[in-house]
Image (cartoon, rainbow, N blue to C red):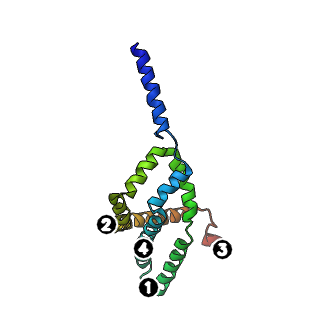
Amino acid sequence: MHRFLAVLLLLTTSALAQQTGVDTPATRDDVLQLFSVMNIKQQMRAIMDSMMQQQKSLVHDMARRKNPNVTTEELGRVDRIMDESVKDFPIEGILDDMVPVYQKHLTSADVSAMSAFYSSPTGQKLLREMPAMTSEAMQASYGRLQKQMEAVAERAEKAIKDNEQRKPGPKPVPKSLQN
């Protein structure tokens, strides 16, 4: 009798969970609605702009270290190239690529709960503050990132030099064999 009640309870709980969307995968519309509530396009743009400013600073510092005579005009050209690349960044396509990932990992109930949170005053505050928090976090880690990028650049340069030294090339002709 107890087994029967346990199985009945399990089946009833499972059926209720499916009816309430707990196990129902999120639909494309569910995810797109979440993206809308989160203002994800604007969030992505703001974060990308912040990241680009950080990258520009890193590139400027590295360029000045490599070539102390680099001009403001040359750095400006690099900045314009970086700005153009951000303008062409395919946010819509990336969001389309993200939808199936969200669907894979989130149920309809998950998305509904997230939408409710991000619609709340606290969720909206988090969304408003996220770009500033990201920017400040990046500024706080700037020195660490700069050291890491310099170390990677040095290793890459060393590897290139080592590779060039190993390349077989024409061997110098001894003076005794010349003429």
Residue depth check, mark 1 versus mark 3: number of the one nearer the observer? 1
Disc ID at residue 32: none
Q: Position of residue 13 (x, y in %)?
A: 43, 30
Q: Earlier in the sequence, mark 2 or mark 1?
A: 1
Q: Residues within 10 Å of mark 1 (few under 14, many from 20)?
A: few
Q: Label 2 belongs to which residue?
A: 140
Q: Quadrant of residue 94?
A: bottom right
The earlier-in-sequence mark between 2 and 3 is: 2
**The label number, if any, that marks residue 53 in the structure image:** 4
> What amino acid does circle 3 point to?
Gln
Q: Which residue corresponds to mark 3?
A: 178
Direction from residue 99 to residue 69 in the image, left or right: left
Q: CA distance from mark 2 to mark 3?
A: 62 Å
The residue depicted at 42 percent of the width and 15 percent of the height is 3
Q: Provide the secondary structure element on which disc 1 rests.
A: loop
Is residue 5 visible to us here?
A: yes
Asked which secondary structure carries label 3, the reply is loop
In the image, farthest residue toward the top: 1
Residue position marked by numbered label 1 in the rendering: 69
